[in-house]
Image (tube, coloured by chain):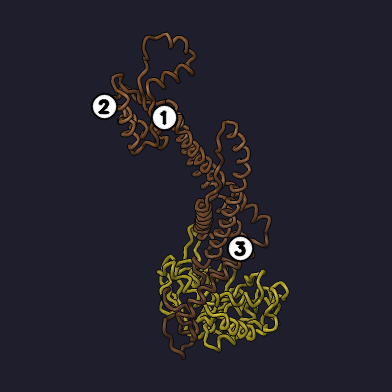
Amino acid sequence: MIRFEQVGKRYPNGHVGLHELSFHTERGEFLFVTGHSGAGKSTLLRLLLAMERPTSGKLLLAGQDLSRISNAQIPFLRRQIGVVFQNHQLLFDRTVFDNVALPLQILGLSKPRIHQRVLTALERVSLKDRAQQYPCDLSTGQQQRVGIARAVVHRPALLLADEPTGNLDPRLAAEIMGVFEDINRLGTTVLIASHDLALIARMRHRMLTLQRGRLIGDGEAGQ
Amino acid sequence: MSATRNPNQQPAERVGAGPRKAPEPGNDGPSFGSFTLAWLESHRASLIDSLKRLAWQPIGSFFTCLVMAVALSLPMGLALLLDNVERLGGSWQRAAQISVFLRMDVDTAAGQALRDQIATMPDVADAEWISRERALEEFQQLSGFGEALRELPENPLPSAVRVTPNEVDKTRLGTLRERLAALPGVELAQLDQVWVERLSAILMLGDRFVFGLAILLIATLLLVVGNTIRLHIENRRTEIEVVKLVGGTDSYVRRPFLYMGTLYGIGAGLLAWLVLAYGLTWLNKAVVKLAGLYDSDFSLAGVPTEDGFSLLTGAILLGYIGAWIAVARHLRELAPR
């Protein structure tokens, strides 16, 4: 599904984001990427979203070489990926329904189909009854769940999450992780960047550990 | 993503397709018809959204349209005034008459035949025969030398043909004068070139002034639209970043701003039309009064319908182009962070 082959990322100011990173994941896998601040977690996610390009090596996503992807192809690549942010990135002038519907509107789905898909996604995160409310009327945990619903509503092959539980208390964080596991059970590959080792250890999934852009660990969390 | 999909395909098997294939990742992708409908729906949604955003700031939107309207109506108004001056020049044809003096040996019958010949020439509106006797009579009345002229042993004045041209145009008048001078029996063909040259020069100056002003104000208008759209883009930066992150193409991001520029153009075009129509009507009262003092029935023409529609079309195009330039400039800066 994801294949990093000696991928390096060096910024114009000389800072090295990733250093000859190599790993691969299978379809439907659930894995964490962990490490301290500046370890390269966000760089890894940005490369997968084609927000940046590797400066060396080869990065393949389901066979597509992201180091050579054209600018015109990037939006179509991103339609296959769901993204969850720590700060939710919700649009506060739109209802919960409209926030979740956004990826489907971009895909050009009909109104009835959008309606059905959005309600299904909101039901999955237990927010169906909040569809017509605005994000500012929701708690932080609920806002995060809206972000997750938006990330999965278009049934992406890959779900990326950058510190999705960073602002949540342990109970809510566990709840959100439960939602990710439900999504993973449907066949979606889930990759979560997090530094919450305690939470990761409880979940018993594969964990990649980064340090200063290098991969220093690859194994099951908690072992 | 592919145009035809395996209905049993799992989400994890779908990444990696090219950009021009069917866009929906689910196994219930839209047909061409429903995709077209969705595309139209997307345009409708962008238009409605743009209208709402303009309506939310009615005063700001109105003043933006007004600034654009003023920028449009200044060159257009001057061009219309110049048209009117040219029309006025047409009504002053008599002031650009050519006097064709015949040789002294040309008798009345030959002179009148020459008048008939001149009257059929293409650039001639009218040709009037003036006999030697009538010429003397007019000269006696106008010169104030009536008594002195009566003492002369014979009439010193030649017969003449007074030619009124079709229009006041320096080049064409010069050509006509040369053709008249070359006719048999013609001693001299005289044109008040200085007057014609002055009018022609004034009109040319006016044309150039309007052209220069139009270029300057069009640039101003593009800057006004561009800056307004830039502010809208800044206000919607988060939304644009999210749209790009979930797969929105540049054209999808650009669309609402282009509608906004077009709507500004429509508003500005209609306002400019209104300002010009009202302004010319208001000015016309004074013009009619002034023309009346010179025994003229001259009045300003209003804004012709076709000119009004040209103004509206131009405003819409400028709004669209201004928005396009603004979005194109800022689109690269709007990459998700």
Q: Residue A139: image x %, image y %? A: 72, 76
- Residue B91 in the image: above or below residue A214: above
User: Which residue is tagged 2?
Assistant: B184
Dividing the picture into quadrants, the one containing residue A141 is bottom right
Q: Residue at x 44, y 19 (%)?
A: B137
Nearest the camera: A157 or B283? B283
- Give the distance between the C-alpha atoms of the residues marked 1 and 2, in whole angstroms: 20 Å
Give the letter of the chain under mark 1.
B
Is disc 3 in contact with disc 1, using a CB cutoff of under 8 Å? Answer: no
Residue B229 visible in the picture: no
Tint applied to chain A in the drawing: yellow
User: Which residue is tagged 3?
Assistant: B236
Callout 1, which amino acid? Gln
Q: Disc count in the image?
A: 3
User: Which residue is tagged 1?
Assistant: B97
Choose mark 2 or mark 3, whichever is in front.
Answer: 2
